[in-house]
């Protein structure tokens, strides 16, 4: 351990199992560019406050340019003592530009502030990428909703046939939920994008470093105000995991709907081959694996959130090594959410809708409410209309015919206020168009939703 960057007080080496238990380099090496950018900003600030000379800073900046190249083209040689990306970069800098200057880099600085700087910079860019994927998913939804606005389908509650709706209305119901997550994401990014740099190990910086200047150079939008909090706080990770979990919950329900709709029993949609797989045993099978994976991976996303809560609850304030355990869940979570968004967009943009199957699944009983509404328009109290309409349904069941096959006499026998014109109720398109208050399933109400969604992208 005396060879480690921090080895001054150590006389014995690390247990080899401890060494690999301790190292974060296998996953935090992805932060190499952020770590270098943070180091250069720190060195520049240390030049401006007189800790480093101009020449020393120039050497550091030049050395890091080379090291960044090495990482980029995979020639960076990791050494056994490289514990994490911070120690690896610093060790290499001293090799490239010499210990005399390289040894000054870490003046006034701690890995505790470095790790959160790297994570925040990395996460900021990842979240911006996810924002782009999410916008694509919502745009794809909006395009389908516009193009297929004529298509009617059964709407369900309790997975029982309820009332006819537009297919577009179903598509937009999910797009609306996704758009809530888009707004939330834009809030989260703001809080991720604040700078811990200059907070030291816990107590702050003793060399009068210009935190504002470092933050500006790195594109941060503000400073974390308290150094103890800055090094121990993982709210930005929690918030990301909460946001991602909430999004995956919604995407999982979207996937579940489509799994049901794509089953042969429903046949409302057909998935493209690109997002389906077959069975090794049953030649006829085409399974919606893409959607099942979205549903399944949502569990993994929630797991990371729950896991991190347990890891962090009860820790003493400031940095503890437990916090290193926030990195891997975050990386995996981001990948899971980003991949799921792209798969969902792919599924939605390539699936084929079957308007005939949807129409065939509509049943006259789904218009029973229309009978009640018809009576309401004739001055009958709704509760009474509901009851009368219920008796129409019961009679059709008794006679074992669909509701639209009852004769006008049958209907009048139930209640004389069911006049000849009651047949107008037996029209799916009409039922849909009557729902024209804002948010409803009529064409104009759906178009209004489309316009509102577009404004939020
Ligand atoms: N690899 C560490 C992490 O991810 C960096 C911080 C280490 N600091 C320390 N005092 N041991 O948390």
Image (cartoon, rainbow, N blue to C red):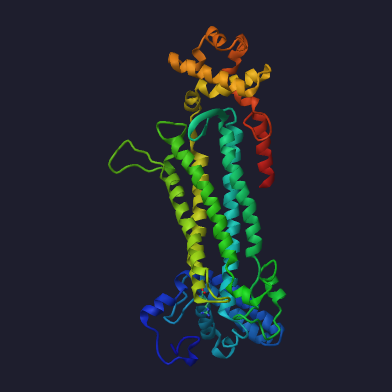
Q: Residue 216, percent across and down?
A: 70, 70
The residue under the point 46% across, 49% down is 294
In depth, the one of 138 and 178 nearer the eye is: 178
**Which quarter of the figure is the N terminus placed in?**
bottom left
In depth, the one of 369 and 16 nearer the eye is: 369
The residue under the point 49% across, 68% down is 311
Res 402 visible:
no
Identity of the residue furthest to the top in this view = 409
Left or right: where 97 falls relative to 278: right
Res 362 visible:
yes
Q: Residue 417, percent across and down?
A: 62, 12
Left or right: where 335 falls relative to 416: left
Give above or below for 127 relative to 169: below
Q: Residue 68, percent across and down?
A: 54, 73
Q: Quadrant of residue 380?
A: top right
Left or right: where 73 falls relative to 149: left
Give above or below for 161 relative to 307: above
In depth, the one of 179 and 302 nearer the eye is: 302
The residue under the point 44% across, 31% down is 267
């Amino acid at each position: 351990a005396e060879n480690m960057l921090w080895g001054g007080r150590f006389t014995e080496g690390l247990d080899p199992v401890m060494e690999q238990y301790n190292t974060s380099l296998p996953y935090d090496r992805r932060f190499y560019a952020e770590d270098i950018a943070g180091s250069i900003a720190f060195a520049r600030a240390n030049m401006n406050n007189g800790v480093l000379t101009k020449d020393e800073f120039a050497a550091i900046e030049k050395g890091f340019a080379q090291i960044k190249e090495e990482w980029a083209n995979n020639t960076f040689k990791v050494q056994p003592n490289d514990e994490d990306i911070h120690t690896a970069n610093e060790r290499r800098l001293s090799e490239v530009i010499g210990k005399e200057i390289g040894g000054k880099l870490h003046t006034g600085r701690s890995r505790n502030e470095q790790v959160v700087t790297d994570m925040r910079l990395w996460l900021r860019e990842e979240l911006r990428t996810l924002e782009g994927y999410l916008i694509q998913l919502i745009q794809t939804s909006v395009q389908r909703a516009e193009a297929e606005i004529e298509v009617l389908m059964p709407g369900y509650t309790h997975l029982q046939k309820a009332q006819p709706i537009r297919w577009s209305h179903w598509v937009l119901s999910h797009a609306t939920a996704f758009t809530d997550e888009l707004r939330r994401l834009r809030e989260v990014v703001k809080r991720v994008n604040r700078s811990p740099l200059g907070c030291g190990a816990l107590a702050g910086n003793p060399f009068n470093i210009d935190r504002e200047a470092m933050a500006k150079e790195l594109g941060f939008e503000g400073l974390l105000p308290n150094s103890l909090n800055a090094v121990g706080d993982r709210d930005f990770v929690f918030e990301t995991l909460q946001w991602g979990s909430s999004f995956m919950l919604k995407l999982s329900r979207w996937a579940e709907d489509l799994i049901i709709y794509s089953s042969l029993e429903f046949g409302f949609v057909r998935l493209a081959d690109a997002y389906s797989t077959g069975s090794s045993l049953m030649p006829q099978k085409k399974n919606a694996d893409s959607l099942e994976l979205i549903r399944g991976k949502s569990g993994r996303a929630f797991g990371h959130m729950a896991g991190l809560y347990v890891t962090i609850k009860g820790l003493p304030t400031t940095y503890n090594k437990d916090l290193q355990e926030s990195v891997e869940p975050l990386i995996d979570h981001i990948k899971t959410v980003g991949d799921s968004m792209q798969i969902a967009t792919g599924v939605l943009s390539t699936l084929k809708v079957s308007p005939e199957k949807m129409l065939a699944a509509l049943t006259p009983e789904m218009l029973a409410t229309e009978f009640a509404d018809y009576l309401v328009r004739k001055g009958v109290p709704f509760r009474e209309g509901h009851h009368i309409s219920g008796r129409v349904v019961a009679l059709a069941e008794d006679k074992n015919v669909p509701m639209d096959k009852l004769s006008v006499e049958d209907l009048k026998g139930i209640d004389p206020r069911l006049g000849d014109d009651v047949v107008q109720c037996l029209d799916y398109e009409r039922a849909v168009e009557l729902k024209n208050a804002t948010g409803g399933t009529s064409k104009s109400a759906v178009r209004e939703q489309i316009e509102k969604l577009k404004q939020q992208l």
